[in-house]
Amino acid sequence: MAKKKVGELIKEARTSAGMTQEQLARKVKETSAQDISKAERGELELNKEQLKAIAKATGVTQKSLLDAAAGKSLMVKPAAAKKTSSGTSLRLSANEKKLVELYRAAKPDQRNYAVAVLKGKVPTLMQNIGGIMDIL
C-alpha cells in the first residue's frame, strides 16, 4: 500500500464511513464542511483534537491520522475490525455506530429492552393491536 497524506486519509476514511463532508463536520467541533474539504485537499491543517474526532467518527485509528499530520511515514490502517461470535470480521456502518452510541448512553433497563426488541422478544405494536382485536 502506498504512503498517504493526511488529507487523503481523511477523505478515504470519510467515504468509507459513508459520510458527506457536512456530516463529518457536524461531528467535529468548530469545523465546517468547507474546512473538511480544504483539509482533504491539503489546504488546511487540522489540529490534534479535530483529527481525533475525525478518527472516532469514521472508524480509523487516531494514530494513522496523527502520524500523517506529523509527516511520519505510514500505511493506511483502518481501526481493527471486531470479531463476531461466528469469528467473522465486522465493520460498522455509520448507522450501526450511531446505534452503539445510543446503546452506550442508555440506562440499563433501556438497554435490556432494546436487546429484547432486536431479538424479537417484545411484541410489536401491530402484534399488540392484533391481540386486542382478537379479544374484542
Image (cartoon, rainbow, N blue to C red):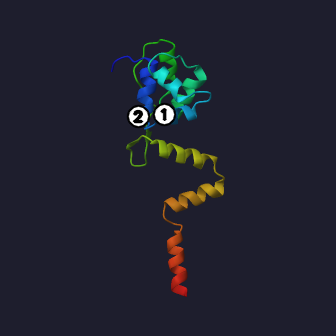
Question: From what the image shows, is residue 73 above or below residue 81?
Answer: above
Residue 78 visible in this rendered orientation of the protein: no
Using the image, tell me which numbered label, if any, was put on residue 123.
Answer: none
- Circle 1/circle 2 CB separation < 8 Å: yes
Residue 65 visible in this rendered orientation of the protein: yes
Residue 100 position in % (x across, y down) = 54, 46
At label 1, the amino acid type is Thr
Gap in angstroms between the C-alphas marked 1 and 2: 8 Å
Q: Nearer the viewer, residue 131 or 61?
A: 131
Question: From what the image shows, is residue 73 above or below residue 8?
Answer: above
Q: Label 1, secondary structure: give it.
A: helix
- Residue at the spot x=52%, y=80% of the render? 131
Label 1: few (<14), some (14–19) or many (≥20) C-alpha neighbours in 10 Å: many
Which quadrant of the figure has residue 114? bottom right
Question: From what the image shows, is residue 33 above or below residue 96?
Answer: above
Label 2: few (<14), some (14–19) or many (≥20) C-alpha neighbours in 10 Å: some
Residue 66 position in % (x across, y down) = 52, 19
Name the residue tied to disc 1.
Answer: 58
If you read the primary sequence from the N terminus, does the residue marked by circle 1 or circle 2 appear first? 2
Using the image, tell me which numbered label, if any, was put on residue 16.
Answer: 2
Quadrant of the drawing holding the N terminus: top left
Quadrant of the drawing holding the C terminus: bottom right
- Residue at the spot x=37%, y=16% of the render? 3
Residue 28 position in % (x across, y down) = 58, 30
- Residue at the spot x=47%, y=30% of the render? 60
The furthest residue to the front: 34
| Residue 26 in the figure: left or right of residue 91 | right
Residue 84 position in % (x across, y down) = 43, 46
- Residue at the spot x=42%, y=40% of the render? 91
Q: Label 2, secondary structure: give it.
A: helix
Which quadrant of the figure has residue 48? top right
At label 2, the amino acid type is Ser
